[in-house]
Image: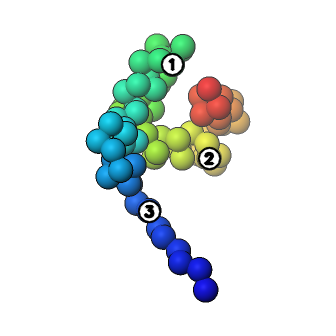
Amino acid sequence: MSDVFILGAGFSRAISPMMPLTSDLSKEVVDRYKHAGSIPAEVGRMIEEDFEKALTFLSQQNPDLTEEKNLRKKELYLD
């Protein structure tokens, strides 16, 4: 039988204090994104609050949105 280890958020920080957490990366992403000015305000806030949640939101189809808006979300996710 093999050992299984489940590593949670912050594991890399436990190895080295120089390693960023996901929350540390969100500001970097927005600062470096070539079209940062075109990020909708609600998505920008989501990115700042929880980058992983924002990626999940952007990657998934939302049945309440038009196809055009879903494609724009997908484009932002892929960028």
The numbered mark at residue 7 is 3
Disc ID at residue 72? none
Q: Quadrant of residue 50?
A: top left
- Label 3 close to label 1 by CB (< 8 Å): no
Work out which quarter of the rendered image holds the C terminus and state it: top right
* Residue 55 versus residue 32 in the image, above or below: below
Q: Residue at x 53, y 14 (%)?
A: 35
**Is residue 42 in view?**
no
Label 3 and label 1: CA atoms lie apart by 29 Å
Q: Are marks 1 and 2 in contact (CB under 8 Å)?
A: no
**51 relative to 69 in the view: left or right:** left
Q: How many marks?
A: 3
Upstream in sequence: badge 2 or badge 3: 3
Q: Residues within 10 Å of mark 1 (few under 14, many from 20)?
A: some
* Residue 30 percent across, percent down from the top left: 43, 23
Cα separation between marks 1 and 2: 20 Å
Tell me which label, 3 or 1, sits earlier in the chain: 3
